[in-house]
Image: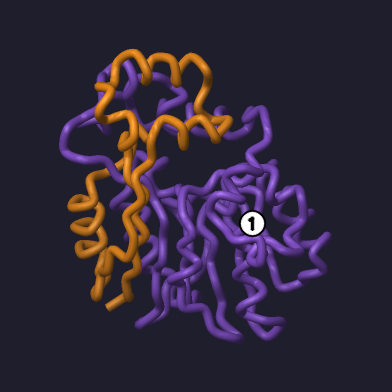
Chain colours: A orange, B purple
Amino acid sequence: MSGALTERDFVQKLERAGFVEIEVLERTPMGIDDCALYPLFTEELLAIMRDLIPRDRLNRIAVCAIIRARRG
Amino acid sequence: MSRDLLHQDEIRALVREAYRSVDGESRAVAEKLYSREELDGVPAIALEHALGVGNHLRYARINLGDTVLDLGCGSGIESILASRRTGPSGRVIALDFLPEMLERTAQAAREAGLDNIETLDGEMEAIPLPDDSVDCLISNGVVNLSPRKARVLAECARVLRRDGELCVADLTVEDEELPPEVLTHPAAWAG
């Protein structure tokens, strides 16, 4: 998730690439418990996240956006 | 910005190594994203290594006979699901930069009895397909892994036919950045 863009930046890059009718169809928060489902998140990283990310943000560390766009 | 924390080559190497050496199964991810009906008949090898972040196929407009590109196919779960929708007259091109992932997808396709899934070795920043050759492009949790996202999206536009559609699930973040100790952790570039 270190490389994740903001939704605004993602949409802008789609526009610049020539996409039109860009729709964000779904937004699903991804919290620490969701991250723990993925073997890519090591125990060490999960522990750092639990220690350093404010408690009120642990249930919304990132957002899964589903985006559809048409090539113009 | 987080994307400036490491050089592009370092990011690529971290992502490649993390996905190559991923240890542990992730069937729970597949079961969280997809319904039991959707997963019915999907081979275990695809389910047990699912690493996507959303169910974008719910929104992807895939028609019979379409050519679909699955960008960063991983273990192949979405390629399998898309293949059912293109039918035998269509095809799914499953692209990944790791031979291990391509082999999993190929095995899953064989076990599912689908012969319209073709694996393709390549990077999303330089998709090895001709211009205007794809009707629908799908991708699940992959674009965020690239240090050159503008390039990736330009490549997506190049290979899509005019009026073709991209439908992706991907991680986004809010304006407030995560702590630097998290952002610079090697596993956070792949996870």
- Which percent across, then down, holds residue B113? 82, 68
Q: Taking B60 as reference, is B51 above or below it?
A: above
Of the pair B158 and B71, the residue shown nearer to us:
B71
- Which percent across, then down, holds residue B150? 28, 52
Of the pair B22 and B156, the residue shown nearer to us:
B22
The answer to which image quadrant residue B81 occupies is bottom right
Of the pair A39 and A50, the residue shown nearer to us:
A50
Task: Give the residue at x 26% y 69%.
Answer: A22
Quarter of the figure that contains the N terminus of chain B:
top left
Q: Which residue is mark 1?
A: B77
- Which percent across, then down, holds residue B101? 66, 45
Identity of the amino acid at label 1? Ile
Chain label for disc 1: B
Q: Is residue B125 left or right of residue B82?
A: left
Q: Residue furthest front?
A: A56
- Which percent across, then down, holds residue B59? 43, 71
Task: Give the residue at x 44% y 21%.
Answer: B186
Secondary structure at badge 1 equals helix
Total residue callouts? 1
The answer to which image quadrant residue A11 occupies is bottom left
Task: Give the residue at x 24% y 74%.
Answer: A20
Q: Taking B28 as reference, is B134 above or below it?
A: below
Task: Give the residue at x 28% y 23%.
Answer: A55
